[in-house]
Image: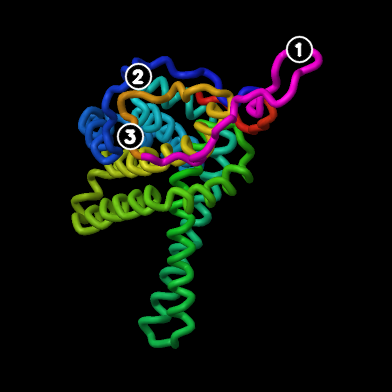
């Protein structure tokens, strides 16, 4: 079965046209979609009000941000609503797990910090550090979990496994998203209580955009692009927002498309690409 479906038909770029670095792409898209972020954040807030729908709402917002990052024009509310329904099952499970994990993390953080402040030894300091490290790791994995849910047809255990691997493989992007979103949280904290008035309008959309814009190129590099390379095709997603970074998973693919044997049924050459088995789903 095909890995991707509903291929994009965007305008793209002319061959040989200069490509922008990811940093400049980010600010170009951010400025272009600035006012839409308020609309998206409000929609996300409304869809998340039942709490248990937090996961599907976040998946839907991730899909919108993914389309923004690859430069595909969309109708925001229609895209959000469609993605909310289409990805409901997996994102609902992840969302419930997220709520539980957030509760456990906050409880552990409060407990160990109180123990450290009361002078209950170095053991609690170690446990506090371990809790923080695990929390940060899980947070960074989420940069990759929701984009995979909306873009790929993989089972949830595979998505979780991939997210851990991609977090490490794309460490530069992971850390960039971590520090950028952490800075946003710090600014929101400093601005309290006035910043609380902005919660329905700003922070979730900005955080989601930063995370998706940083993580999706890594997913495309390690999962999507190799699929098209194996078929001898070019990923149709590439648009004017692409980077000029030399970041390829396979640096030597010489002779990849050379025939290795003859298919007796069709009497046609069989290439190495024909033998590659890739599990996944089409881009939505």
User: What secondary structure is found at the residue carrying circle 3?
Assistant: loop
Residue 126 at x, y = what percent?
A: 46, 78
Quarter of the rendering containing residue 16: top left
What color scheme is it? rainbow
In the rendered view, tell whether residue 235 sits above or below residue 165.
above
Residue nearest the observer in this picture, 158 or 272: 272
User: What secondary structure is found at the residue carrying circle 1?
Assistant: loop
- Is residue 111 something that shows in the picture? no
63 left or right of 181 in image:
right
Label whose residue precedes the other's in the sequence (1 or 3)? 3
Q: Name the residue under label 2.
A: 12
CA distance for labels 1 and 3: 41 Å
Q: Name the residue under label 3.
A: 243
Q: Give the range drawn in magenta.
A: 246-273
CA distance for labels 3 and 2: 13 Å
Label whose residue precedes the other's in the sequence (3 or 2)? 2
- Report the residue at 20% width, 58% height from top: 190
Q: Name the residue under label 1.
A: 267
205 left or right of 84 in image:
left
The answer to whether the residue labelled 1 contacts the one labelled 2, judged by CB atoms less than 8 Å apart, is no
- Report the residue at 34% width, 39% height from top: 245
In this rendering, the label closer to the viewer, 1 or 3? 1
């Amino acid at each position: 079965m095909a890995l991707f479906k509903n291929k994009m038909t965007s305008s793209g770029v002319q061959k040989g046209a200069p490509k922008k670095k990811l940093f400049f792409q980010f600010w170009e898209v951010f400025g272009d979609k600035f006012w839409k972020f308020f609309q998206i954040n409000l929609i996300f807030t409304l869809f998340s009000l039942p709490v248990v729908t937090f996961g599907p709402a976040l998946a839907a917002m991730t899909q919108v941000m993914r389309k923004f990052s690859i430069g595909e024009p969309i109708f925001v509310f229609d895209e959000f609503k469609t993605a909310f329904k289409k990805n409901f099952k997996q994102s609902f499970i992840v969302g419930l797990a997220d709520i539980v994990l957030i509760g456990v993390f906050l409880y552990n953080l409060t407990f160990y910090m109180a123990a450290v402040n009361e002078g209950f030894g170095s053991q609690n300091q170690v446990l506090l550090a371990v809790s923080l490290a695990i929390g940060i790791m899980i947070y960074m994995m989420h940069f990759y979990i929701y984009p995979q849910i909306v873009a790929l047809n993989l089972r949830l255990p595979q998505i979780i496994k991939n997210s851990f691997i991609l977090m490490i493989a794309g460490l530069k992007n992971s850390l960039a998203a971590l520090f950028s979103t952490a800075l946003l949280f710090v600014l929101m904290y400093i601005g309290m209580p006035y910043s609380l008035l902005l919660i329905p309008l700003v922070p979730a959309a900005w955080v989601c955009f930063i995370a998706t814009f940083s993580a999706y190129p890594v997913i495309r590099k390690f999962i999507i692009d190799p699929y098209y390379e194996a078929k001898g095709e070019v990923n149709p997603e590439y648009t004017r927002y692409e980077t000029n970074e030399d970041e390829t998973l396979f640096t030597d693919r010489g002779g990849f498309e050379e025939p290795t044997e003859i298919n007796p049924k069709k009497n046609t050459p069989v290439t190495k690409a024909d033998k590659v088995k890739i599990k996944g789903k089409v881009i939505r």
